[in-house]
Amino acid sequence: MAQEFPPYANFLARLTIVGAAFGLPLLVWLSLLYTRSSYGTNARVMHEQPVPFSHQHHVAVLQIDCRYCHQSVETSSFAGLPATETCMNCHSQIWVGSQMLAPVRASYRSGQPIHWKRVYNPPGFVYFDHSIHVQKGIGCSSCHGQIDQMPLTYQVPSLLMDWCIECHRHPEREIRPREAVFDMHYAKPDDQLDLGRRLVKEYGVKDPYDITSCSICHR
Amino acid sequence: MGSLETGVGSKEEDRTRDRMNQILFAISDQHTTAASKPAGVGRRYWRSLEEFCDTDEFRRLVQREYPSQAAFALDPLNRRKFLSLMGASLALAGASGCSITPAPTTEIVPYVRRPEDIVPGKPLFFASAMAHDGAAVGLLIETHEGRPTKVEGNPDHPASLGATSAIHQASVLDLYDPDRSQSVRYLGETRTWDDAIDAFRAMMSEPGQQRGGGLRLLIGTVASPTLRRQLESLQQRLPDARLHTCESAPNERALQAARAGFGEHGSPRYDFTKADVVLSLDADFLYEGPGHLRYAADFISRRRVRTSAADARQATMNRLYVVEPAVTCTGAKADHRLALRASEVEAFARSLAREAGLSTPAAAHGDVRSRHSTWISAVAHDLEAHRGRCLVIAGDRQPASVQLLAIALNDHFGNIGQTVEYTRPIASLLANGSTTDWIGSFRDLTDAMGQGAVKCLVILGGNPVYTAPADIPFAENLAKVPLRLRLGLHEDETSRLCQWHLPETHFMEAWSDAIAYDGTATIVQPVIEPLYEGRSAHEVVAILTDSREVPGRAIVREYWANEWKLDLGSSEFETRWQTALHDGVVEGTRLPAQTVTLNTRWQSELARESSQLEGSQNEDPTSSLEIAFAMDPSICDGRFANNGWLQELPKPITKITWGNTAIVSPATAKRLGLGMGSYAHGGEHGGYHMPVVTLTLDGRSVDAPLWIMPGHADDAVTVHLGFGRRHAGRIGGSSDETVGFNANLLRTANSLWFARDLKITATDQTEIVACTQAHHQMEGRDSIRAASLNNFQEHPNFVSQAIDDERRERTLRAADGLSLLTPHNYDPPRHKWGMLIDLTSCIGCNACVAACQAENNIPVVGKDEVSRGREMHWIRIDRYVAGDADVPKAFHFQPLPCMHCENAPCEYVCPVEATVHSADGLNDMIYNRCVGTRFCSNNCPYKVRRFNFLAYSDFDSPGRRMQYNPDVTVRSRGVMEKCTYCVQRIRHAEIGAETEDRPLVDGDVITACQAACPTQAIVFGDLNDPQSQVKQAKDSPLHYSLLDEELNTRPRTTYLAELRNPNPDWEGG
């Protein structure tokens, strides 16, 4: 009767043992690496948009307030994207012949909306609300980064839950005076934690235990 | 064990069935002889007959939560397969969690021109109204970026007061029904509106047609004053054209009786706030008919007891007597209920009139009087004792003679002008009221069609080919009409027999107006552009009248400008118009009460009405069976058959979904030798195999599954209309597969609502009836607590006294910190959300169930899945029966949403923490964490958790997706779900209050079920707020928690025990 196991079976057995010991953790580590990579989260990825809109130009150079275009940021869960009409308020006067703005003019003429690529794309089971964050003194740049320096818009944070929950656990680290919410040049003061604790109290930010309840964001 | 899956014919099941029928019928025997139930058999409160009989099989089934799966796992062959599959899925479980490709980029599409008022992310509410059964209820339609997603009642509208019915809730699903007709069709081919209009014009330009000689219009009930005016001008313009109707006007028979009694037509309008004693003669006034939501609110407002224990003596309640054949919501709330066959109600009313001292001709069935003499005299005395503060109501299904008797009784007791008043008819086909007899009008049309006198028939609404009584050959004669046009939402049975089908707009797509039960008008405004090529009835009638294509808005505005005597262009008109649109009511349109006097010859009118009654009066009632027809509680006359929400809504009393049955009492079932069916997947799981019987009436017959309903009148069968449709759509039935049977095939013009001489023959077939009444069993624990008002006054703390000392001890100990669970801190400023359900107020109408379904994106699962116990409703209404199966003492409704236990048993068995507590004490369910172990459901003592066994939600159809509430996740397969207390509404209200820098106040958060409830049986709020309605109501001595004493779950949803007010001077009844 022939041997059940050929001589190289020993090698396979060792490979399996070593593989299990190192390979599996490696696999786990790689998948975690993947999840957190910008490939997995879309962070710092620039999307090709129908119109190469530059926040840098409109915010830093022209000094247009965020709320001129994102009108419902203080009142609604959705910050709002400007209607074509809003663009045309200016662009019917300036840069009227620009090739880059052709899709805007086409949209205005035809009534067909512009299809932008969504940059911040949290999963469907997450219900984020802009208005409450603005109300409680979380600045635009806390999540959107130095958008005034972005010729093309990209997502800054990972948008993974640990990123959200970090701030919900320690709101005093990010909170700023309400009047500075839309300030792109705001820098955290040295006594941020003291200021933060004071503002948390003043603005009635709930206890971290309350704002880390699952149904705050998932329903 | 595999037999549990296939179900039919195993010996074990036969034994169980035999045993059950034995117990059941032993009880009915015993009852007739000794009127007592055998000791040790049956429970005090029970939901299904199995539970009542308490068979071994039933006990065994209760042990398992999902018996159909249990059977699968116990079969050795299947089990092996299951294990291997499970092994495979375990191996892949890790991999499926992470996808290799990054999340797909989605698009964001802003407006080109942002519409005024729309803030993306915030819903808008538009006041409108839905006309149903000829009367409107004011609604607020919620839209998200232009998509209607949900309806709420309009608090300013007198027929709604903020409440809705299940039908209103489901109307939004009808809007998006993919089976709606989408274009003009000619003999099945797609055409244009112009083609149809040309065809009509060509017909009308033929010689002799100029005055509309051959033109007939067939139309449903008209609740729109504008449409009524348009029809009048059509008749002026085409004087030879004739109008017919194919539907009963609201209170049609009451109108006829009013004419007989008062000499003029009048719509009765009841004021339940003034009525101390109410007698219903087969009238389901809490559930159907114009004004039922308002009536339910007013009626219950006189029944709600919110006194403290010390003031218990001051508590008052109204009293309700109900005489009816089948159990209805109204009958279930009755303090005294008498099950009589529909034909015997007249005899009862006559005997009562005699007892009250009215001289009426002798009662036809002398037998009713002698059999129920105590009942009759007790009611007569009670009514007499409450002169001017009592009310007698006759149901629409009863003949005009009973209506006339009700008028006479109300007149006799001095109620007219007090608890009942009469107004101009709110809706009739013709404004001059020349006809209120729809069946006569319909028959005239059919005859004219048969004689070839009709050249062109235009059918607006209704579905006469399906709903026509069997002895009116409408469908056959229709073929003799040269030109047939039909305007309708669906291409249904009627459309198929017309050359032209014209798509109609849904009421959310078009301008119109509608009047409520009291005459209050509402302007119906569109909230979305027509999804398809539909046009409204107004636009079509305008074309018929003078070939003008006028937009509906102009037609409605013109009518109101006329009505207000204002210029269309004037700013005054514009202001009034805008106000009416905004408020949802047109001010000053409520109809005034008319002064009426009962004419002295009403007795002879009564004799005349009675002589028109079919059948011989003196026949022995027991020699033949009687059949009663009733509109289906969910899908009505079949018009909502293609609405999945309504099809799957368990009917209030029988709890049957997806079909109709022939309903009989246990005693009649025994007499017929037919028993309760065996279990398909276990009775607990709703797959009842019921014997199919053949119902034969006048030589016409249909096959129907039998259903045994305790409390039904003996020797009578009730069948619901609206089923067995052949061209309703994918949900409601097609020629291949119908849902239920068509009871219209037995109905004749002379006996629209009940008929004698029904023959029942057994067949050897069985059919699965999907009934949810025994789903989600709580092992017969003490769920219902009830007492009479007297009892409450003597023992105000009867609810807490019911808990025995040992239990209280245990609860106290647990409360003392001896719990395994970590205690939470719910102190202010934290909110502590809680719900209270008042069982006295609940009328079991299902509005909450449908509202929850609409709000929370709850899927429809279909008959097969329901019969496996997999329906997904987050709130169920348990219907309990008290007493014997033969003569039930009372019925109780108990709505059961998630209890949001403070010590939630579901939470500590979840291996992945997918269900955890929120800081404000909600039992959160996190779908994206759930891996579907179902441990939580297994450990839930209330059985309120629902599992997505399959991918029930529709993620793909564009129409369906538009309805979804954007604030609630649409769940996929393998995920557990349950009531969240509408957490999306809580969070929105919290954020709203905080952005406005104000504290959240009571009433800021209203759950979907609470908003829909017509009787305010559901109260929700913050238990930390001492002023909140819910906190105050929970201080009532009637307050109790479900299973808390046994399990120390500390539920946040609690109940108020049900109180009844039986006549204290009358033992028994």
Image (tube, coloured by chain):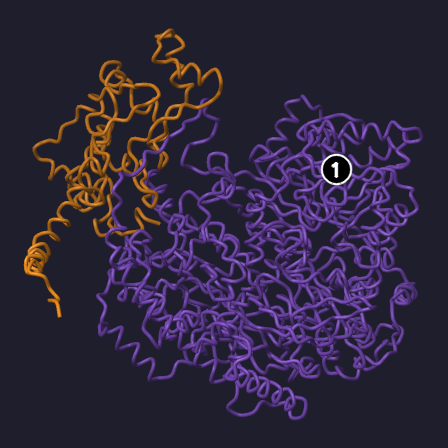
Q: Is residue B401 visible?
A: yes
Query: B263 or A49: which is nearer to us?
Result: A49
Provide residue B84's location: percent of width, then percent of height.
30, 65
Provide residue B1043's location: percent of width, then percent of height.
38, 74
What residue is rendered at 57% in x and 39% in y? Answer: B127
Query: B961 or B1015: which is nearer to us?
Result: B961
What residue is rendered at 75% in x and 54% in y? Answer: B467
Q: Amino acid at mark 1?
A: Trp
Provide residue B773's location: percent of width, then percent of height.
53, 70
Left or right placement of residue B366 versus residue B319 in this view: right
Provide residue B39's location: percent of width, then percent of height.
53, 92
Left or right placement of residue B77 versus residue A22 in this view: right
- Residue identifier under label 1: B500
Left or right placement of residue B325 versus residue A23 in this view: right
What residue is rendered at 24% in x and 60% in y? Answer: B825
Disc 1 secondary structure class: strand
User: What hue does chain A carry in this figure?
Assistant: orange
Quarter of the picture containing the C terminus of chain B is bottom right
From the rendered image, report the letter of the chain displayed in purple. B
